[in-house]
């Protein structure tokens, strides 16, 4: 019997297509589990069960008439609270926007609905996606299903908790510095930071100019990620940076045989001190690629530090996007976020120069790296999940230590990068391997991730949760 809590989206859509379960029955199951576990996980921060049930009923009737529901027909969906879904507030985890209702869906949300997904609610995020943990003054902290004292990561932590906790099979996610890969690694999911422009970001009254943020899948399986991406990828007029459609569906690309690949493996990028138990799991996963017949070469390149530039320029961009709210309602922002905005008031040409110089150096490094190699492997993170309320631990044994140094660089360059589950720390928490592909080769990253998943499946182990938790 299929475990409806942790079945893949692909399995669930198969059950619906075979009439083994109706969209109404699947939605009721998801809503019951949300009612039981969301008070503990705090994954969802807004729900509309009535509208979701009405849509599920319509789809159930259509199915009875022999109509096709679409590739995601009947699947419950969570939408990250940085993204717009008609009928729900988009608060961005901030008191400043607690009553903000957008006029319509973002492009990718509209595409998911058109494919048959049923939006049940919005998922938690740190204020304006600023942190690697998902806590804010408006809704509180989301919790990791593997250990409720720990964070599911950020900024897509509510989505990660919802999917890894078995509340819904699909949830949207975005990544501007690691916000898909961080929660994927901390909760044992598969997360793909797509190529910049692969999924349209829009419509927006003001386009961000840093060109580092993307939308992408955060799922239980690689096939689910390919299925999701097939629905949302492709250009749209609201996003001038959106890419042309891929040459073939991503789900179809998974079935293509892989050639023998030349792969670089870098343990630190010259910056990270990875805990021994996490490195142990990463090293074992790298061996899988050798066992699959690929050539894996140790690479000890050190790249420029990126976190400081990201923080400084992200703050300045946020200040511009939120200038009116900052001027009129300064006191309503979370203390940490307002400090970031305050510190950005003196950003100047020197900061821009430093940021773009560092970005240029990393872009040159990736260019030269992918002239020699087909892929790059690194640990996803240099820590296991930390306390749910934060802050991100930035010291280790009295020395500076940034656990997310592996993720920022590939937002600077726009390359596709995924996190796959590779095992567990000594404390029983998931950890991940980052797979980085050449520019625009989302298909290759998915193919390699799928080959790894088949060689070392992870879907047989998920957290045990009950209403008592």
Image: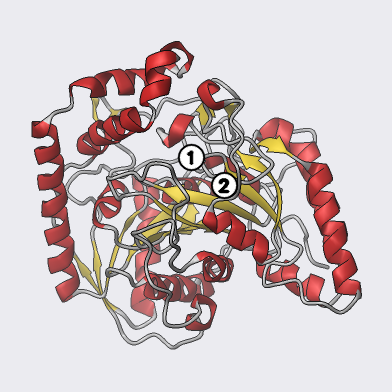
Mark 1 residue element:
loop
In this orientation, which residue lies closer to the viewer: 178 or 184?
A: 178
Residue 329, horizontal then vertical, whole percent: 45, 14
Whether residue 302 appears in this view of the structure is no
Label 2 Cα crowd, 10 Å radius (few <14 / some 14-19 / many 20+): many
From the viewer's perspective, is 36 left or right of 97?
right
In this orientation, which residue lies closer to the viewer: 86 or 294?
A: 86
In this orientation, which residue lies closer to the viewer: 157 or 149?
A: 157
Q: Which mark is residue 172?
A: none
Image quadrant where residue 45 sits = top right
Name the residue rendered at 16%, 58% in the picture.
363
Which quarter of the image is occupied by the N terminus? bottom right
Query: What whole-number distance in Å separates the C-alpha atoms at marks 2 and 1?
Result: 8 Å
In this orientation, which residue lies closer to the viewer: 349 or 337?
A: 349
CB under 8 Å between callouts 2 and 1? yes
Label 1 Cα crowd, 10 Å radius (few <14 / some 14-19 / many 20+): many
Residue at numbered disc 1: 153
Name the residue rendered at 61%, 26% in the picture.
99
Name the residue rendered at 33%, 42% in the picture.
404
Query: Mark 2 or mark 1: which comes first in sequence?
Result: 1
Number of marks in the rendered image: 2
Name the residue rendered at 46%, 46% in the picture.
425
Residue 441, horizontal then vertical, whole percent: 34, 72
Residue at numbered disc 2: 160
Residue 163, horizontal then vertical, whole percent: 63, 51
């Amino acid at each position: 019997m299929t475990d409806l809590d942790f079945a893949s989206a692909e399995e669930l859509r198969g059950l619906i297509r075979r009439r083994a379960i109706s969209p109404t029955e699947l939605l009721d199951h998801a809503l019951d589990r949300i009612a039981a576990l969301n008070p503990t996980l705090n994954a969802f921060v807004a729900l509309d069960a009535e509208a979701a049930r009405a849509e599920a009923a319509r789809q159930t009737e259509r199915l009875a008439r022999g109509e096709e529901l679409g590739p995601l027909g009947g699947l419950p969906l969570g939408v990250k609270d940085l993204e717009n879904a008609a009928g729900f507030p988009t608060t961005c985890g901030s008191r400043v926007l607690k009553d903000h209702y957008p006029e319509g869906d973002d492009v990718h949300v509209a595409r998911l609905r058109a494919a048959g997904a049923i939006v049940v609610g919005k998922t938690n995020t740190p204020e304006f996606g600023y942190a690697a943990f998902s806590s804010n003054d408006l809704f509180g902290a989301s919790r990791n299903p593997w250990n409720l004292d720990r964070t599911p990561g950020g900024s897509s932590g509510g989505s990660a908790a919802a999917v890894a906790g078995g509340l819904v099979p699909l949830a949207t996610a975005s990544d501007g510095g690691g916000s898909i890969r961080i929660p994927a690694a901390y909760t044992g999911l598969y997360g793909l930071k797509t190529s910049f422009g692969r999924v349209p970001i829009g419509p927006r009254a003001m386009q961000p100019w840093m060109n580092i943020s993307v939308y992408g899948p955060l799922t239980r399986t690689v096939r689910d990620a390919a299925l999701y991406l097939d629905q949302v990828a492709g250009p749209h007029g609201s996003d001038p940076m959106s890419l042309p459609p891929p040459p073939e569906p991503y789900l179809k690309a998974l079935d293509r045989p892989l050639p023998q690949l030349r792969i670089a493996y870098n343990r630190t990028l010259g910056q990270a001190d990875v805990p021994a138990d996490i490195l142990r799991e990463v090293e074992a996963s790298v061996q899988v690629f050798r066992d699959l017949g690929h050539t894996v070469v140790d690479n000890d390149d050190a790249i420029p530090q990126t976190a400081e530039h990201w923080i400084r320029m992200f703050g300045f961009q946020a200040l511009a996007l939120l200038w009116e709210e900052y001027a009129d309602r300064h006191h309503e922002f979370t203390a940490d976020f307002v400090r970031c905005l305050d510190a950005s008031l003196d950003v100047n040409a020197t900061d821009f120069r430093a940021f773009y110089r560092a970005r240029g150096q990393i872009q040159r490094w990736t260019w030269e790296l992918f002239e020699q190699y087909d892929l790059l492997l690194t640990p996803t993170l240099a820590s296991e999940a930390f306390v749910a309320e934060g802050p991100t631990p930035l010291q280790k044994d009295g020395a500076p230590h940034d656990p997310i140094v592996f993720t920022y660089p590939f937002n600077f360059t726009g390359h596709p990068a995924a996190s796959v589950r590779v095992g567990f720390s000594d404390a029983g928490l998931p950890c991940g391997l980052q797979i980085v592909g050449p520019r625009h080769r989302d298909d290759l990253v998915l193919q390699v991730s799928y080959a790894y998943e088949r060689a070392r499946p992870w879907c047989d182990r998920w957290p045990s949760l009950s209403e008592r938790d």
